[in-house]
Every structure is written in structure tokens, then in C-alpha cells.
Image (cartoon, rainbow, N blue to C red):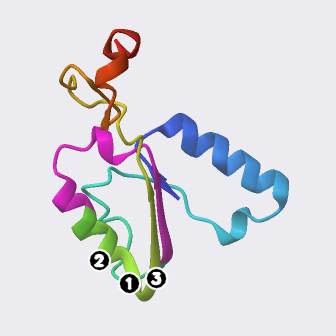
Amino acid sequence: MADVSRDLLDHSEARAEEAGIADRCDFVRASATDLRAIGDGSVDVVTTRSVLIYVGDKRRAFEEFHRALRPDGRLSVFEPVGSFRGREPRGVFLGCDVGPVADLAE
């Protein structure tokens, strides 16, 4: 497991200890754009949850994910789509035309 948060890594390591699987886990403090502590083609899965929204150099992060993944590895990404969009024009709400009820949409 890699994360920038030492607290999260410590918590995860404690949970792995409780589950009796810590000997099969590595806990690495690293950012998404610098995973050099993780070897090339050494991981089966890269999973991110609300990470990329905070990463300035997204291309670099994906390059690192690709480098660390095994050739048949998997990538799972979840981001809060629409949470930080700019203001929509009047009469549009979440991309839908709401002209007739624009006052309610506002």
C-alpha cells in the first residue's frame, strides 16, 4: 500500500497485523507522482479513491501507475465527478436543460 499519509499507513498496517496478513503487505509513504519506492511491474492493482483531484501532474501519476503495474495489472480510479465544476449557465443544472424551472434549480 502506498499513500502520502503516515497516519493512514500506520492504521492500515495495524489492521493488517490484526488480520494476520501483515507479512504479505508493504506500506510505502509516497505520492502518486513519485512511486519510485515501488519497483517496475511489481503490483497487481493500483486503486485510487479521490486522489487525482488533488494531484497537479496527473499525467505523471498515470505514468507512475503504469510503470508500477505488472503487464496484466489493473487500475481502478474513482473521482468525485462534478463536485468541483464551475458554475453552469442559467437554465442548466448538472448538464440538463432546466429552463422552465430555472428559478428552482438555482
Q: Please provide percent x and percent y for residue 67.
A: 29, 77
Q: Residues within 10 Å of mark 3 (few under 14, many from 20)?
A: some
| Residue placed under numbered mark 3 in the picture | 73
Q: Indicate which disc residue 41 carries.
A: 1
Q: Indicate which disc residue 67 carries.
A: 2
The amino acid type, in three-letter code, at marker 3 is Gly
81 to 83, vertically: above or below: below
Q: Please provide percent x and percent y for residue 38.
A: 38, 69
The amino acid type, in three-letter code, at marker 1 is Gly
Asked if the residue under mark 2 is in contact with the one under mark 3, i.e. CB atoms within 8 Å, the reply is: no
Q: Does 65 appear in magenta? A: no
Q: Is residue 49 left or right of residue 40?
A: right
Asked if the residue under mark 1 is in contact with the one under mark 3, i.e. CB atoms within 8 Å, the reply is: yes
The amino acid type, in three-letter code, at marker 2 is Arg
Magenta segment range? 44-61
Q: Earlier in the sequence, mark 3 or mark 1?
A: 1
Disc 3 from disc 1: Cα separation: 8 Å
Quadrant placement of the C terminus: top left
Q: Does 53 appear in magenta? A: yes
Q: Please provide percent x and percent y for residue 77.
A: 43, 58
Asked if the residue under mark 2 is in contact with the one under mark 1, i.e. CB atoms within 8 Å, the reply is: yes
